[in-house]
Amino acid sequence: MKTVWILEDHAAFRRSLEQVFEDDAEVNCGASFGNADAMLKALKRANPAPDALLMDLGLPGKSGLDAIGEVRRISPGTLVVVLTVFEDDDKVFKAVCEGASGYLLKTSGSGEWIRAVKEALSGGALMSPKIARRVLEMFSQFAPKVPDSGLTEREREILRMLVAGLTNKELAVNLAISIHTVDFHLRQIYGKLEVHNRSGAVARALRDRLT
C-alpha cells in the first residue's frame, strides 16, 4: 500500500481529499496538514516518508511553491503532485522546475486527483489538459536546440518516449528491456540534464528541443 500526504489549507476541501483516498485499495492518506511548516516538520521526522504529497500552492505562511523545493531536499523519494486553482504561466513553470510530478486544477474532479497520484507513483506525470497546453506553449518560446546534452542515442530515444508520456513499464515493454534497466537509463538522463525527475527531464527536452 502506497501512502500519500495531503497539504491543503481549506479544512472542508482537505477532508474531501482525505475521503477520496479512504476507500482506495492502492493509495492511503497517511496524514494531512493545513500549512507547509507543519507538513515539513512532520516530513523531517517521518520514517518511512510518504510516497507522494498532494498539495495546494495557495497556502498561508510558506507558499506551496517554496515548499516543493524543501520537500525535494528533505525527502527526494516523495513525489509532489500539485492540486490548485492557479493556472497562470509563472506558477506552472516554477512548480514544474521545482520538481512537481503532476499539476492539476481542483476543478478536475476526484477521479483525476487519484489518477494523478497513481500516475506519479508509476513513473508518469499527469497534468490537466489546459495546464499541459500552457507548459508546451511556454517551452516552445525558449532558445533554439542546445546541440550537446551529452545524451547517448538510446537516452535520446528514451527521452522522446518520456515526452510522449510513456510510463516506466511502457518504456520497458517498448524497448524490450527490464524495469531496472529503464531506471538506470533514467538516472543517467536526469544526471546529464541536471534535473531531479521525469517532469524536469521533459521540461529540459522541450525547452532545449533535445528530441
Image (cartoon, rainbow, N blue to C red):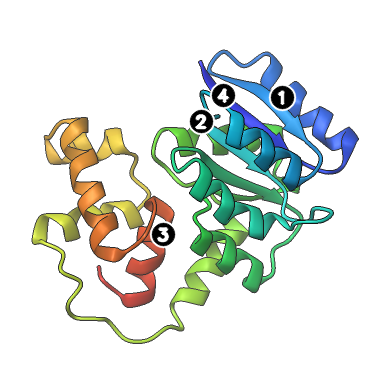
Question: How much space separates mark 4 and mark 2, taking CA atoms?
Answer: 5 Å
Q: Say whether disc 1 or disc 2 marks the residue closer to the N-terminus.
A: 1
Question: How much space separates mark 1 and mark 4, taking CA atoms?
Answer: 13 Å
The residue sitting at 56% across, 39% down in the picture is 116
Label disc, if present, on residue 51 of the rendered structure: 2
> Please, what is the three-letter code of the amino acid marked with disc 2?
Asp
Residue position marked by numbered label 4 in the rendering = 3
Q: How many residues crowd around disc 1 within 10 Å: few (fewer than 14), some, or many (20 or more)?
A: some
Label disc, if present, on residue 20 of the rendered structure: 1
| Image quadrant where residue 46 sits | top right
Residue 127 falls left or right of residue 54: left
Q: Say whether disc 4 or disc 2 marks the residue closer to the N-terminus.
A: 4
Nearer to us in this view, 129 or 99: 99
How many numbered discs? 4
Q: Say whether disc 3 or disc 4 marks the residue closer to the N-terminus.
A: 4
Q: Say whether disc 1 or disc 3 marks the residue closer to the N-terminus.
A: 1
Q: How many residues crowd around disc 2 within 10 Å: few (fewer than 14), some, or many (20 or more)?
A: many
Q: How many residues crowd around disc 3 within 10 Å: few (fewer than 14), some, or many (20 or more)?
A: many
| Image quadrant where residue 207 sits | bottom left
Work out whether 113 lies above or below 103: above
Question: How much space separates mark 3 and mark 2, taking CA atoms?
Answer: 18 Å
Residue 125 appears anywhere in the view: yes
Q: Say whether disc 3 or disc 2 marks the residue closer to the N-terminus.
A: 2
The residue sitting at 15% across, 69% down in the picture is 150
Work out whether 134 lies above or below 102: below
Asked if disc 4 and disc 2 are in contact, CB closer than 8 Å, the reply is: yes
Residue 87 falls left or right of residue 73: right
Q: Secondary structure at mark 3?
A: helix
